[in-house]
């Protein structure tokens, strides 16, 4: 086996980042198999029956019916020992950060996390994403995790694949950790996922007093308000309004972006929008690469004029 993709169960269906990991693994070339763990393993394998994979290995055992780091790391270890993949690939999710370092330590296989490109070795961001570093390894086996949205889930090559159940050797002395229900952000009164119009605020709004301007624009347009993470972290809007890899994923008819740079962690949550209108004073801002309508200018000047024009 060349590549083993370890899948993540997102409440009974395949996690978006697992689909991206499969697309990335297929791009790397060679034979690609996948591993599904837990009580939904069969359902995950079913979801992949039309995908070009050698097979989906399923593991369902009482001690790993739902996620726990002890059990999952032991299962992945046993599957790697038995199947000897050259490369193990996984999406860089919170769950991955919790249990994959244990697999790496148990097997003494290097783990290169949060990869953003495979163009020149394994490329990852360092120094708060100011620099890219190319990492290589001389080890025979390696575990890689891909940053969210580095590959498109739509790029998964279709084909067919079978599934095979794998017997693990687990006992309660190996599984001491108990996981609680997966964390879910408390839902706010606003349903951003089904909003058709979103006015989204970025750090370009500059200060808290200016936030009202975005709410006023949203009101005139009949839109909901969302935001980038720094705006949420500053406490200027509620956490449920955050869009991105650690926030919500939305696909409105119009995403009206005000002073958002277009960092990948933000874009992953809104790139499915049917139309993107971005205002940014920096003509080089990455948001313009995906915007359908680009306005280079100052949001603090444009938004009040736009509100006045829409009201007249
Ligand atoms: C693990 C991890 C998870 C993350 N998850 C998320 C997430 O879920 N969501 C998210 O959004 N981010 C997330 N981030 C942060 C992300 O990397 C970016 O830092 C963030 O998206 C940047 O927000 P921003 O575009 O509002 O701010 P900035 O990057 O500071 O951009 C501000 C933009 O506003 C423009 N601007 C400034 N003043 C004006 C003006 N007066 N008029 C017009 N334009 C102006 C600037 O040119 C700039 O392009 C995450 C980061 C990490 C490491």
Image (tube, grey):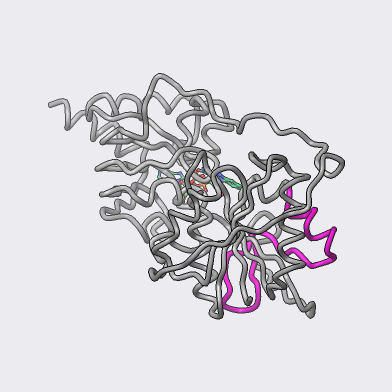
213 relative to 288, above or below: above
262 relative to 188, above or below: below
Q: Is residue 101 magenta?
A: yes
160 relative to 199, above or below: below
Q: Determine the residue positioned at 73% across, 70% down.
A: 142
Give residue 191's position: percent from left, percent from top: 36, 27
State which quadrant residue 286 falls in.
Answer: bottom left
Q: Nearer the viewer, residue 163 or 67?
A: 163
Q: Determine the residue positioned at 23% across, 35% down.
A: 306
Q: Is residue 138 visible?
A: yes
Q: Nearer the viewer, residue 250 or 101?
A: 101
Q: Determine the residue positioned at 29% across, 51% down.
A: 295
Q: The N terminus lies in which quarter of the figure?
A: bottom right
Q: Is residue 52 left or right of residue 92?
A: left
Give residue 93's position: percent from left, percent from top: 61, 49
Q: Determine the residue positioned at 67% across, 65% down.
A: 144
Q: Nearer the viewer, residue 240 or 132?
A: 240
The single residue placed furthest to the top in the displayed view is 189
State which quadrant residue 210 falls in.
Answer: top left
In magenta, the rendered stretch is 99-124
State which quadrant residue 253 falls in.
Answer: top left
Give residue 276's position: percent from left, percent from top: 30, 49
Give residue 277's position: percent from left, percent from top: 29, 48
Q: The C terminus lies in which quarter of the figure?
A: top left
13 relative to 194, above or below: below
Q: Is residue 133 left or right of residue 201?
A: right
Q: Is residue 131 visible?
A: no
């Amino acid at each position: 086996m060349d590549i083993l993709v370890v899948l993540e169960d997102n409440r009974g269906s395949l996690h978006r980042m697992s689909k991206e990991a499969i697309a990335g693994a297929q791009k790397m070339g060679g034979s690609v198999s996948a591993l599904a763990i837990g009580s939904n393993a069969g359902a995950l394998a079913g979801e992949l029956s039309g995908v070009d994979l050698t097979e989906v290995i399923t593991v369902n055992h009482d001690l790993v019916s739902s996620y726990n780091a002890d059990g999952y790391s032991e299962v992945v270890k046993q599957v790697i020992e038995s199947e000897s993949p050259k490369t193990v690939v996984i999406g860089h999710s919170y769950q991955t950060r919790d249990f994959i370092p244990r697999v790496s330590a148990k097997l003494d296989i290097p783990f290169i996390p949060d990869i953003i490109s495979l163009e020149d070795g394994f490329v990852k961001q360092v120094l708060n994403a100011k620099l890219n570093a190319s990492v290589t390894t001389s080890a025979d086996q390696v575990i890689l995790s891909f940053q969210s949205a580095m590959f498109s889930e739509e790029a998964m090559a279709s084909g067919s694949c079978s599934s095979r159940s794998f017997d693990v050797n687990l006992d309660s002395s190996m599984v001491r950790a108990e996981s609680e229900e997966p964390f879910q952000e408390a839902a706010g009164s606003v349903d951003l996922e089904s909003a058709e119009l979103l006015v989204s605020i970025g750090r370009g709004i500059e200060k808290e007093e200016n936030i009202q301007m975005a709410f006023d624009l949203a009101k005139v347009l009949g839109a909901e308000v969302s935001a980038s993470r720094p705006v949420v972290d500053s406490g200027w809007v509620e956490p449920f309004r955050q869009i991105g890899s650690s926030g919500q994923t939305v696909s409105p008819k119009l995403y009206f972006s005000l002073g958002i740079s277009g960092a990948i962690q933000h874009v992953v949550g809104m790139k499915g929008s049917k139309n993107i209108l971005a205002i940014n004073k920096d003509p080089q801002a990455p948001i313009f690469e995906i915007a359908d309508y680009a306005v280079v200018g100052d949001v603090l000047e444009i938004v009040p004029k736009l509100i006045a024009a829409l009201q007249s």
